[in-house]
Image (spheres, rainbow, N blue to C red):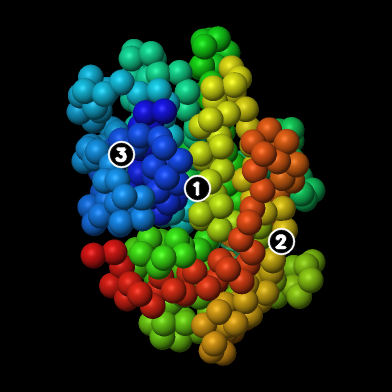
Amino acid sequence: MKILVTGGTGYIGSHTAVELLSSGHEVIIVDNLYNSNIHVLDRIEKLSGIKPKFYEVDILDYDKLEEVFKENTFDAVIHFAGLKAVGESCIIPLRYYENNISGSLNLYKLMQKYGVNKIVFSSSATVYGDNYPVPFKEEYGYGDTTNPYGTTKKFNEIILSDLCKADENLSCVLLRYFNPIGSHESGILGEVPNGIPNNLVPYIAKVASGELDHLRVFGDDYDTVDGTGVRDYIHVVDLAKAHVKAIEYCTKFKGADVINVGSGKGYSVLEVLHAYEKACGKTLPYKIYPRRPGDIATCYADVEKAKRVLDFEVERDINKMCEDSYRFTVMNPNGIE
Ligand code: NAD
Ligand code: UD1
């Protein structure tokens, strides 16, 4: 298939581009490089043997985005482009609603205008909120999102579901990611957070590299195995492979379908820290801090649907996730240059 990948130079998009190209799909990337850089394209080429066609376009710019649709005939879209910093979304919510909603509406309008009727959307487990027991199942309703970022994911899911109700030819897979971590095992593709990372594993990586002196563990009084928060971590390459299956699934059904993408297992903050210590061969210092506002105790996926519908199961465990994350950190001290 010829696939438009928005946000394709970003963390998950670049890993997915490699897997799509390696599976014989054609990839055209649109990204405004707000949170990624042009050198990612060389790295995608190194890993897949193919340099994808690239447009430096902001999806908020309808006319420029339309040029991309005029110049290419797409079979499908994978829509990663978006802003994703939860804390920042509470400070500048308008920017998040504009980018993640208005930008997406431009894309959906152009898909309709140019007859592109298959899309995979990057959603998040955050749409379950704190309202349901684990494991989170797709048939649960929406929970109360606790931040504008999460609300943009929920709104996009609702918008795409409504578009499917109005257009019987549209196929839309809403992938709810749990916690993607790790890097390509080559060490040449990975996540490059801006500034001090908010997320656990990028933060631990900076402790391992000596850039930060200890991990702040947010709360040790949750009702979990050791009192620290439990999450479902998924290797980014496994997640990328799920997208290949999802885009192929789009050819087999019509309508909107929600699918969790996780490992189905939960690990506590301290369990992840210890796995990382094993991967880097060092003891990593940590201190206990108060709970982080908005955090829940435990979050992991019911993965039965992904297995049944997509024939998808993860292949990489927590040790592999930490080893690959550490390799990327060591090999790219200045990020992707
Ligand atoms: P990322 O920031 O690495 O990648 C997103 C890409 O989109 C970046 O390259 C950025 O430059 C681009 N972009 C942003 N706004 C754009 C715009 N207006 N026009 C064109 N390009 C734009 O993030 P990621 O971790 O790869 O996440 C990809 C998607 O998955 C996002 O939608 C994110 O919200 C979602 N998601 C991520 C996680 C996670 O933990 N990483 C979890 C759940 C969902
Ligand atoms: C967070 C977001 C979620 C988003 C996801 C991916 C919040 C409340 N949730 O998920 O909406 O989809 O990132 O971008 O921000 N932790 C520490 N110390 C740290 C960092 C994290 O102890 O320095 C703990 C957290 O309290 C949590 C676990 O590690 O228990 C995982 O945190 P994180 O990586 O930020 O992911 P989520 O909170 O699950």
Q: Is mark 3 within 8 Å of ligand 1?
A: no
Question: Given the image, on which type of amino acid does mark 3 rest?
Answer: Ile
| Near-viewer residue (70 or 165) | 70
Q: Earlier in the sequence, mark 2 or mark 3?
A: 3
Which residue is disc 3 drawn over? 29
- Tell me: 178 left or right of 54: right
Please tell me how crowded label 2 is: few (under 14), some (14-19), or many (20+) other residues with Cα within 10 Å: some
Q: Quadrant of residue 71?
A: top left
* Disc 2 target residue: 266
The residue depicted at 36 percent of the width and 64 percent of the height is 188
The image shows residue 76 at horizontal and vertical percentages of: 42, 26
Name which residue lies at 38% across and 78% down.
330
Whether residue 9 appears in this view of the structure is yes
Instruction: Return the residue at label 1.
Output: 240
- Label whose residue precedes the other's in the sequence (1 or 3): 3
Q: Which numbered marker is on residue 116?
A: none
Q: Image point 66% across, 60% down: which residue?
A: 231
In this picture, is 173 found above or below 217?
Answer: above
Q: Residue at x 30, y 35 (%)?
A: 28
How far is mark 2 from mark 3, CA to CA?
33 Å
| Secondary element at tag 1 | helix
The kind of residue on which mark 2 rests is Gly
**Helix, strand or loop status at disc 3:** strand
Image quadrant of ligand 2? bottom right
> Can the viewer see residue 179?
no
Q: Where is residue 314 in the image (x, y as percent from the top left)?
A: 64, 53
Other-residue count near label 1 (Cα within 10 Å), few / some / many at <14 / 14–19 / ≥20? many
Residue 170: image location, x then y, percent: 51, 16
- Looking at the image, is mark 1 or mark 2 nearer the viewer? 1
